[in-house]
Amino acid sequence: MAQAFLPPSIFQVVCVVLVLSHFRSAAVQYELEITNNGPITTGAQATISASLIMKNDDDVLIQDPNSYRFNWIYAPLTLTKKSEQQFNSVIVVTGEFPGDFPISVWVTHTDCWLCWPIAGNVTMLQVTEFIVGNLTIAQIEDNSTFVKQGPSSATDTLTLISFFLHDPSNYFKLASFIYYWDFGDGTQQVTKESFVYYNYSTVGNRTVHLKVVAEWEEIGSSTNGRKMVQKTGDFTTALELLDAVKSIHVIGSRETHVMENLSLSLQINGSPPLTLCWLIKSECIPLEGEKCHLVVINGSYYNLSHTFNDAGQYCLSVRVENGVNTLQTYHEIKVWPTGIHPAFFALPCIAVLSMMLALVMYTNFRSSTQQKDLVEVADFDFSPLSDKNYSPFDLEPSCLQMCCSCCFSWSSQEYSQQKLLPESITEHQGSWQITDSAGFWKEEEGSKACEKQKECASGKYILKNLNKIIQDKTTQNKGGTKQPGTI
């Protein structure tokens, strides 16, 4: 019995097309990205964009010469504009009522209307009746501005609070704004600018409130043809005020020995909680990330200890942060070998310096003594008088007046009557014995007796010219008869 051939039905054809489309889709991966620039205020426009991305099994982007169709669903929003390219599509919508509205899109081949969508996606557009924007807080430090990271800010630092209006369609281009600020510490301010500067002086939690009022004139269908439109917006932001980390003091020794436990204390000037990171290396390095000993403390002090295995020069690097700022400091440490103290190196130096100083003082003393002896020997030449003894009364009155004229104006007879003249000058075992009736002279060696100043019975007697007297007397007696023991 022969079997009749039945032509394929439409259902079978559709199934075959779907199977082929499935295998084709399995070879190529499609992704559809969708974004919107919401939220928007009622009456403003929002832009929604969709992009088709194709990749192979190796996750590599590929180019497809085929064209695709983007199908949008955006109700109850109103479409105002649409544009489409090969792999992209953009629509512009507006909303007259507040709410969250889903916007969906799917992509198909333009030449295969029976094919299943190759990709699809959905996005949510938020429409509100209030002004849209956000508050930001930045702080001024060292003539530079930095944006606050997280809810914490530093006290005693100039703070910049700014409002940024979100108006992608330029809906408020004709509006005038008034800003009502409440800084959370009882201080309020009204401005026409969208930013203010403020300085918080105390630690604590604050909430900044801002009310924005926008007004503009809009052309309407009323009898006068114009109307005033007003929109408002309320914004808040929480603020945690902390004292910035201003200083880090490392308390402890800068010297230690090998295998000795070195204890150091860190004193931190800043509000806790504090995140502390420390590291000891052969050189001072800035600390980044978590490649260090990381601890969190709730106070202002931290004690650490470390034992060095090798001698040398080391550096303790410390980084402290508390959500407001970050500060780093360094502490150099000298590690000595076991049993050697730096004072031992100073003792030999002190001994050498002491010896050198003593040698210099001794040399100067000897030099001055020798120069003095040379001068005295040059002034006195007693070699011809070694065996003579002169009577002091043999000296002429003029010589005595030369010796004592500075003290007295008496004659030689008056000197003799007052018994101020020396009775005798005798030599005894290399020294000169000079005596008078009052006993004011004593034995001196060489010419030193002639340089001494002695007091007379009724004044000062200066013997500086005695050597001149003896020399003159010696010259006069040359050729005469020597009298032993007498000059």
Image: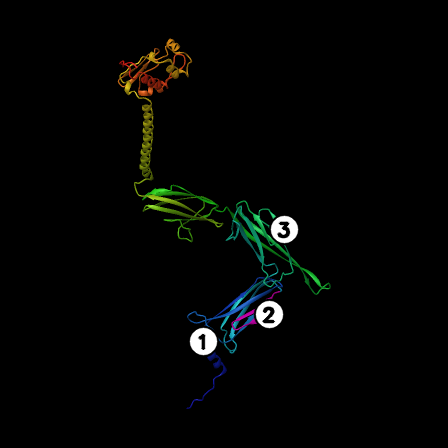
- Check the image and report above or below for 297 versus 417: below
CA gap, disc 3 to disc 2? 40 Å
The image shows residue 28 at horizontal and vertical percentages of: 45, 73
Q: Nearer the viewer, mark 1 or mark 2?
A: 2
Q: Nearer the viewer, mark 1 or mark 3?
A: 3
The image shows residue 339 at horizontal and vertical percentages of: 30, 40
CA gap, disc 1 to disc 2? 33 Å
Q: Secondary structure at mark 3?
A: strand
CA gap, disc 1 to disc 3? 64 Å
The image shows residue 470 at horizontal and vertical percentages of: 33, 17
The image shows residue 338 at horizontal and vertical percentages of: 30, 42
Dot 3 or dot 2, earlier in sequence: 2
Majority secondary structure of the magenta segment?
A: strand
Q: Is residue 264 left or right of residue 39?
A: left
Picture quarter containing residue 104? Answer: bottom right
Indicate the amino acid at tag 1. Answer: Arg
Say which of 202 and 61 sits in front: 61
Q: Are marks 1 and 2 in contact (CB under 8 Å)?
A: no
Q: Secondary structure at mark 1?
A: helix
**For mark 3, what is the residue?**
190
Task: Give the residues in magenta.
Answer: 78-95
**For mark 1, what is the residue?**
24
